[in-house]
Amino acid sequence: MIIVGNFKSYLVRKGDAETVVKAAGKLKTKHKIILAPSFVHLGYISAKKHKVALAAQNLSIFEGGAHTGEVSADVILDSAAEYVIVGHSERRAGGETNSIVATKVCQALGSKLKVVLCVGEAERDSHATYLSFITEEITSALKGVKENDFKNIIIAYEPIWAIGKSASEAITTDDLEEMTLFIKKIVHENYGEKQAKAIKILYGGSVNAENVKSLMVPGLDGFLPGRASASKETLIALIEAIDS
Ligand code: PGA
C-alpha cells in the first residue's frame, strides 16, 4: 500500500514534524510511506535524510523568477521531496481552479516531481452529478500529461464531505469500491489501458487505525490520511492496522 501523510498545518515545530518522519522511517514495513510536512519543515527534514519519501503540500504555477512567496517545482525538488500534492480540496476552497491544477500538474512533472492529484466532490446527489464532477476534475488535470508520465501520477479520491470527520463518517466500503473502479474507468476511457494500469488510486477522508482495514477495497492502492498522519502514535497505529 501507499500511505501519503498530509501534515497540513497541524504541526508548528519542525522538531515535531521530524519526530513523525523519523518514527515512520524506522518502521519495518513493506508499505511505501510518503510524508508531506509544511514547506518550511520540508527543507529542514529532508536535509537529515530519513528513510521515507517526502512530498510538498502544494507548488507554484510559475517556474521561478519574479513571483514573491511562490515555491516552484524545482525548489521543491531541490529540497529532496520526490512528490507533490496537487489540488487538495483545502486549496481548491481557496480558489484553485481545475485549470490552475492542470498547470501545476505540468509544472511538477516537468521538474520530475511525482504528483498526488486530489479530487473529490463536496456532496453526493441522487442524480449522480458528482460523477461528472469527478470526471471533469480528473480529465482537466491530466489533459497535458504524456503517456509515459501516468506512472508518476497518484490520484487521491478525497470526498470533501468525508474530510476531517470521525472514522464512522468516512466513505462506506461499497461506495469506495465503486469510486475506485469509476476512476480507473475514467482513465481507461480517456487515455487508454496502459495508463489506467499505471495510475495509482488512494482514498483520503477521515482514515485512521479504526477504519483503515475496512477501507482496503480491490483496486485501491493506499490512503491519504491527514490528521491521523500528524502524530507518530496515530500514524504508526494506522500502518499497523493495515497489516493486522
Ligand atoms: P483527514 O484529511 O484524514 O484529516 O480527514 C484528509 C485530507 O484532507 O487529506
Image: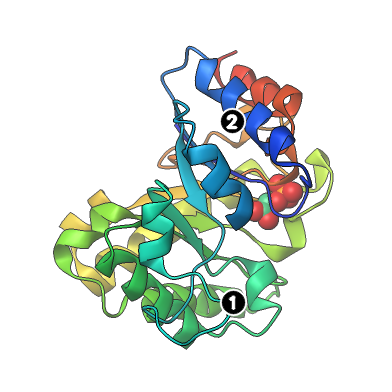
Up-down relation of residue 237 to residue 123 (above or below): above
Q: Secondary structure at mark 2?
A: helix
> Residue 30 falls in which quadrant of the image?
top left
Q: Nearer the viewer, mark 1 or mark 2?
A: 1
Q: Which mark is residue 69?
A: 1
Q: Judge by depth and name the residue closer to the eye, 3 or 7.
A: 7
Mark 1 or mark 2: which comes first in sequence? 2
Q: What residue is pinned by disc 2?
A: 21
For image coordinates 62% across by 47% down, the residue present is 41
Along the horizontal axis of the image, is 221 left or right of 95? Answer: left
- Give the x, y percent position of residue 193: 18, 58
- Amino acid type assigned to the residue bearing label 2 in the image: Val
For image coordinates 79% across by 52% down, the residue present is 164
Which quarter shows the N terminus?
top left
Q: Secondary structure at mark 1?
A: loop
- Give the x, y percent position of residue 125: 71, 75
For image coordinates 69% across by 74% down, the residue present is 126
Pointer 2 local density, CA inside 10 Å: few below 14, some 14–19, many at least 20? many
Q: Which mark is residue 12?
A: none
Q: Is residue 205 visible?
A: no
The CA distance from mark 1 to mark 2 is 26 Å
> Residue 135 falls in which quadrant of the image?
bottom left
Q: Is residue 113 visible?
A: yes
Up-down relation of residue 53 to residue 155 (above or below): above
Along the horizontal axis of the image, is 77 left or right of 6? Answer: left
Q: Judge by depth and name the residue closer to the eye, 187 or 235.
A: 235
Q: Judge by depth and name the residue closer to the eye, 123 or 200.
A: 200
Pointer 1 local density, CA inside 10 Å: few below 14, some 14–19, many at least 20? few
Along the horizontal axis of the image, is 242 left or right of 13? Answer: left
- Give the x, y percent position of residue 190: 27, 74
